[in-house]
């Protein structure tokens, strides 16, 4: 760390001396797996994972019983089964997880309107204006854990700090540790006050810093950097050389404890998507188009829950050699239904050379606007382009939206696989 960074760090520490620890980070424990156990109590205490159940599937969430065998999120399912022969793997039910997440965020907003969801199972809160009703930050954190457990029958960890960085690291430290020896009780709540930040941060592994993924950690390890304390020895220019100007400077700031980010309650969702890794490579265009249309239905359902529509449809294709491409089309009108999104995705696939075989396929929608705003644009600017983009006329779109909303209700009640589109546009069944 250069002299300029040391001066900046000293200034940050001086400013922090009187600053309150009013940022909370709440993170649910093994969220997807815990919801599955909640809905099926016979799974309690068993090694359960949620994720792709095929040979190339990936673990999205692992229960603490599974973590005792060294099974963790992002691990290939085949490796998870090797480590835990009695593993119970269940496919994800993202509609169900979204429902529980919505209830969770509602609970948090009862405490403060300054809630920034980061994903379905974690959020930042700014409680600086909530002390009059709810007490100190630590009391709020303890109360939140109790409210979540009482209302949802699920557990979580809460970190409290002066910055987002410290709060997130604290919530991770408050989680139950699990290894081959068993699962220990976590602190549940950990508060890091201003005077404790430096010692807390220096002891963190470098992998804990946001933005340091597995590859970045490997690159830093070649320079003998395994902890934040180690990283403090590297000059800012070294980070820029390794990771580029923007990412390198951002990492250097976080390692120095400099984090001016505030809680953003109206954080914009930039895209909604769905991806799947296949058990075997698929080079058949018709098959891939059917799968893309099915994914488009899932994306459209999530858009309906968020009350948004999107202008740009993107397909992500990862081939058998792990090379990955993205192809997008921006539409004249925002896509509102699975039929529209699926038609564009199918057309994008048709333009690709698929002979290498596809191992992963994804469908995403971006350029999101509120559903009401999208509807106004549809009325004011009727379609003029002759390019086929999957757009439906207003009447057909409304009927399709009603049909797909009814299908959403059926799937919520009877499961994701309870209802499938009757036929694909190519004449084949939509179900893979």
Image: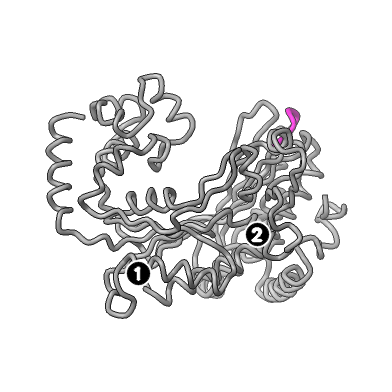
Query: Of residues 164 and 178, which is closer to you in this image?
Result: 178
Residue 358 shows in the view: no
Q: Is 357 part of what is drawn in magenta? A: yes
Label whose residue precedes the other's in the sequence (2 or 1): 2
At x 33% / y 49%, what residue is drawn? Answer: 165
- The residue segment tinted magenta is 355-359
Mark 2 — residue? 94
Residue 316, quarter of the rendered image = top right
Residue 65 shows in the view: yes
Count of marks overlaid on the render: 2
Q: Residue furthest right?
A: 428
Q: Where's residue 403, x and y in %?
A: 75, 73
Query: Which secondary structure type mostly characterizes the magenta part of the structure?
Result: loop
Position of 291 compared to 143: left or right? right
| Secondary structure type for disc 1 | helix
At x 69% / y 54%, what residue is drawn? Answer: 45
Real-space Cα separation, disc 2 to disc 1, in angstroms: 32 Å
- As drawn, 325 above or below 385: above
């Amino acid at each position: 760390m250069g002299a300029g960074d040391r001066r900046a760090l000293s200034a940050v520490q001086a400013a922090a001396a009187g600053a309150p620890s009013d940022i909370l980070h709440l993170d649910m424990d093994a969220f997807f797996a815990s919801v599955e156990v909640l809905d099926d109590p016979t799974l309690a205490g068993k090694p359960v994972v949620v994720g792709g159940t095929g040979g190339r599937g990936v673990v999205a969430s692992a229960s603490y019983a599974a973590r005792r065998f060294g099974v963790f999120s992002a691990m290939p399912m085949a490796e998870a089964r090797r480590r835990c022969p009695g593993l119970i793997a269940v496919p994800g039910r993202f509609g169900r997880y979204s429902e529980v997440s919505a209830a969770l965020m509602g609970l948090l907003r009862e405490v403060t309107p300054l809630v920034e969801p980061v994903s379905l199972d974690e959020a930042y809160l700014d409680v600086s204006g909530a002390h009059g009703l709810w007490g100190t930050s630590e009391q709020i954190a303890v109360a939140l854990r109790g409210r979540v457990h009482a209302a949802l029958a699920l557990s979580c960890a809460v970190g409290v700090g002066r910055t987002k960085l410290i709060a997130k690291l604290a919530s991770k430290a408050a989680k139950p540790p699990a290894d081959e020896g068993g699962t220990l009780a976590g602190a549940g709540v950990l508060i890091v006050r201003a005077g404790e930040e430096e010692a807390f941060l220096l002891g963190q592994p470098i992998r804990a810093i946001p933005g340091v993924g597995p590859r970045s950690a490997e690159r830093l390890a070649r320079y003998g950097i395994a902890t934040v304390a180690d990283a403090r020895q590297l000059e800012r220019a070294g980070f820029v050389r390794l990771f580029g100007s923007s990412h390198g400077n951002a990492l250097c700031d976080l390692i120095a404890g400099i984090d001016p980010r505030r809680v953003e309650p109206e954080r914009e969702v930039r895209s909604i998507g769905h991806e799947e890794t296949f058990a075997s490579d698929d080079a058949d265009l018709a098959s891939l188009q059917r799968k893309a249309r099915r994914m488009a239905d899932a994306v459209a359902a999530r858009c309906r829950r968020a009350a948004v529509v999107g202008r740009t449809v993107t397909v992500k294709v990862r081939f058998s050699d792990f090379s990955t491409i993205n192809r997008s089309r921006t539409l004249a009108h925002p896509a509102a239904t699975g039929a529209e999104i699926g038609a564009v995705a199918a057309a994008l696939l048709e333009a690709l050379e698929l002979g290498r075989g596809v191992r992963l396929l994804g469908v995403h929608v971006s350029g999101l606007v509120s559903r009401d705003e999208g509807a106004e644009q549809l009325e004011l600017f009727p379609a003029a382009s002759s390019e086929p983009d999957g757009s439906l006329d207003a009447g057909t779109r409304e009927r399709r939206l009603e049909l797909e909303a009814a299908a959403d209700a059926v799937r919520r009640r009877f499961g994701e696989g309870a209802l499938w589109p009757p036929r694909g546009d190519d004449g084949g069944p939509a179900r893979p």
